[in-house]
């Protein structure tokens, strides 16, 4: 069984920064991609940033230049450094990973961590 555990959310003022972390644990053979998604109240879940095991990154347009995704493959961990935060970044942020484990290949989600940007 694979688990994704997130940390780092919280309340921050506009213009502030937060760093999210997500660690995958279990009998993991490989991880193809890891990423962050978010869901604001009344809105659909959207991709924020993803990174492949080769380091290729992709971002939603609204966070380019402000957010940076990185990973530590040896630790099966992905990070999201969020700078210049705006109120519209307020959402529950979910970690996602495409994992091959002893149970085969499938997609996993973390439990979510709240990010609130407010004065």
Image (cartoon, grey):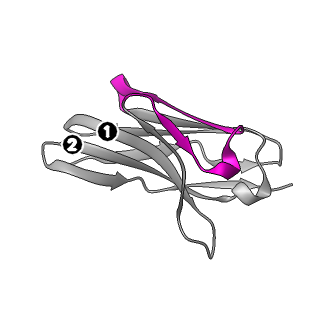
> Above or below — where is 58 with respect to 92?
above
In this rendering, position of residue 97 left or right of residue 17: left
At 81% across and 56% down in the image, what residue appears? 118
Q: Do the residues under discs 1 and 2 have CB atoms within 8 angstroms?
A: yes
Q: Give the class, few, some or many, for how many residues have Cα within 10 Å of label 1's Cα (few <14, many ≥20).
A: few
At 12% across and 43% down in the image, what residue appears? 102
Question: Residue 39 at what x, y percent from top left?
Answer: 57, 64
Q: 64 or 101, which is in the foreground?
A: 64
Residue 55 magenta: yes
Q: Please name the residue that numbered disc 2 is placed on.
A: 100
Residue 2 magenta: no
At 38% across and 28% down in the image, what residue appears? 54
Q: 52 or 31, which is in the foreground?
A: 52
Q: Give the class, few, some or many, for how many residues have Cα within 10 Å of label 2's Cα (few <14, many ≥20).
A: some
Q: 65 or 82, which is in the foreground?
A: 65
Q: Quadrant of residue 43?
A: bottom right
Q: CA distance from mark 1 to mark 2?
A: 8 Å
Secondary structure beneath label 1: strand
Secondary structure beneath label 2: strand
In this rendering, position of residue 6 left or right of residue 4: right
The magenta stretch is 54-76
Q: How many marks?
A: 2
At 61% across and 47% down in the image, what residue appears? 9
- Which label's residue is closer to the chain start, 1 or 2? 1
Determine the residue located farthest toward the top in the rendered image. 74
Which part of the image, by quadrant, shows the C terminus? bottom right
Question: Residue 85 at what x, y percent from top left?
Answer: 76, 46
In this rendering, position of residue 67 left or right of residue 94: right
Q: Nearer the viewer, mark 1 or mark 2?
A: 1
In this rendering, position of residue 35 left or right of residue 25: right
Q: Residue 32: which disc? A: 1
Q: Quadrant of residue 29?
A: top left
């Amino acid at each position: 069984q694979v688990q994704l555990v997130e940390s780092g959310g919280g309340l921050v003022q506009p213009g502030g920064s937060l760093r999210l972390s997500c660690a995958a644990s279990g009998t993991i053979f490989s991880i193809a991609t890891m990423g962050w998604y978010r869901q604001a109240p009344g809105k659909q879940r959207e991709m924020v940033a993803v990174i492949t095991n080769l380091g290729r990154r992709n971002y939603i347009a609204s966070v380019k230049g402000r957010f940076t995704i990185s990973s530590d493959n040896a630790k099966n961990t992905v990070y999201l450094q969020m700078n210049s935060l705006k109120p519209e970044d307020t959402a529950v942020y979910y970690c996602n990973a495409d994992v091959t484990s002893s149970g085969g290949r499938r997609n996993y989600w973390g439990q979510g961590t709240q990010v609130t940007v407010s004065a």
